[in-house]
Image (cartoon, rainbow, N blue to C red):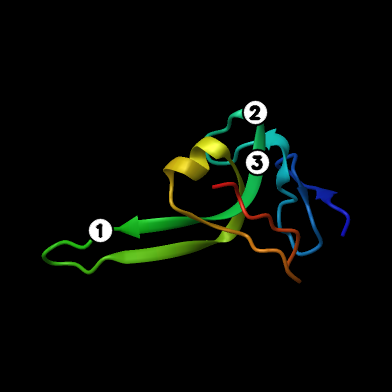
Amino acid sequence: MRAMPDDTGHGRDAAGVPAGLGGAGTCESCARDGEAVWSVRRVYVTQAAWDTEGRRDTAAAVELWCGACLANYPHEPVEPGPGGPGVTPPG
């Protein structure tokens, strides 16, 4: 599929998934420019406490993240498939 430009300056395929194929771009988590970026979904983790259960929520939106953000923040890689061109991040 051909990537189409969007308002963030990143290409997205027809399904709206960022075309993050490990190429250079801007990280949508920390805004570093010129970094290799990969398509991921952000994961929000809430630790359990005495009065609340722990939670793990995965965002629906696909973002482009750099290697530093991949190493430090919870996320799920976007898998290749009919929804668009995903890439399994390194490590």
Graded by Cα atoms within 10 Å as few (under 14), some (14 to 19) or many (20 or more), the crowding at tag 1 reads few
| Badge 1 amino acid | Gln
Residue 70 or residue 60, whichever sits in front: 70
The kind of secondary structure element at disc 2 is strand
Vertical placement of residue 56 versus 66, above or below: below
Q: Which residue is mark 2?
A: 33
Judged from the image, the secondary structure of the residue bearing numbered disc 3 is strand
> Disc 1 designates what residue?
47
Screen quadrant of the N terminus? bottom right
Cα separation between marks 2 and 3: 10 Å
Disc 2 vs disc 3: Cβ atoms closer than 8 Å? no
**Rendered location of residue 6, percent (x, y):** 77, 47
Amino acid type indicated by mark 3: Val
Q: Tell me the tag on residue 37.
A: 3
Q: Earlier in the sequence, mark 3 or mark 1?
A: 3
Where residue 53 sits, quadrant-wise, is bottom left
Residue in front for this viewpoint, 65 or 79? 79
State the image coordinates of residue 26 (x, y, percent, origin top left).
65, 34
- The image shows residue 6, relative to residue 43, as above or below, that is above
Point out the residue furthest to the front here: 91
Label 3 crowding class (10 Å Cα cut-off): few <14, some 14-19, many 20+?
Answer: many
Q: Is residue 11 above or below residue 27?
A: below
Q: What type is the residue that disc 2 sits on?
A: Asp
Label 2 or label 3, whichever lies nearer to me, is 3
